[in-house]
Structure formats: C-alpha cells, structure tokens
Amino acid sequence: VAIALYAYVGDQAAISALMGGFAVTGGGYAAMLATRGGCNPNPGTVLIMLLKAEAVKIIVIGILLLAVFRFYAGLVPWALVAGLACSALISGAALRSMYGSK
C-alpha cells in the first residue's frame, strides 16, 4: 500500500500508510508480549489471557495513532487508515492460514 501511495500520491501519504501499518504491528507485538508467561490449560485462564492481550493491543494501537496524529505534521489521514486496514487484514489472513480453517 505504501509503495502504491508513494507512486501515485507522494511521500507524505506513503509515510502515513507506513505509520498506520506500524501501529497495528506494534499493537500485535505488545499483545504477544502480554501473553508470555505461564502455560495453563484451564479454559478460564486462557480466556482471561486472550482478553488481556486484546486490551493491550487496542491500548497500544490507540497510543501509537494518537502520537502519529499529534506529532506528524504531514499526515494524510486516509492513507493512515489504508495502511492500518491493510496491516490488520494481512495479520488476520496470516492467523487464518497459520491455524487453518475448516
């Protein structure tokens, strides 16, 4: 997405798309770090760990997007959303192909 935006719109849009993608990637990485720890097969514990990871991911994505909106003067909002959406779709597709679906 960033390469296409760079070619058709310009460098500010490409940087905005990269920042949107980085926000999702950073949030996913923080969620992964939040789930590190004990391995308890209890379904309740697994659910709590999953909810905790999702909360961490949403908070980190929110903080990163807030920082981008606040500190990046050349922001192209629709490009940021495009990068964010593309990164979220790719991570969802990767999880689906990793664990398979029937």
Image (cartoon, rainbow, N blue to C red):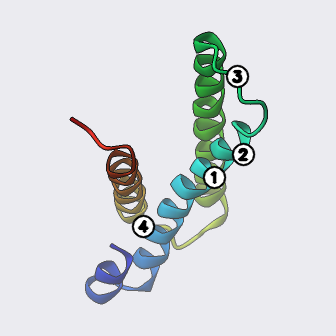
In the image, residue 70 above or below residue 44: below
Quote the CA–CA distance across marks 2 and 1: 6 Å
Q: Earlier in the sequence, mark 1 or mark 4?
A: 1
Which element is circle 1 on?
A: helix
Q: Which residue is mark 4?
A: 76
Q: Which residue is mark 2?
A: 33
**Label 4: few (<14), some or many (≥20) within 10 Å?**
some
Tag 2–tag 1 contact (CB < 8 Å): yes
**Label 1: few (<14), some or many (≥20) within 10 Å?**
some
Quote the CA–CA distance across marks 3 and 1: 21 Å
Quote the CA–CA distance across marks 3 and 2: 16 Å
As drawn, the label of residue 40 is 3
Which quadrant is the C terminus positioned in? top left
The residue lying toward the viewer, choosing from 22 and 44, is: 44
Which is in the foreground here, disc 4 or disc 3?
A: 3
User: Which residue is farthest left?
Assistant: 102
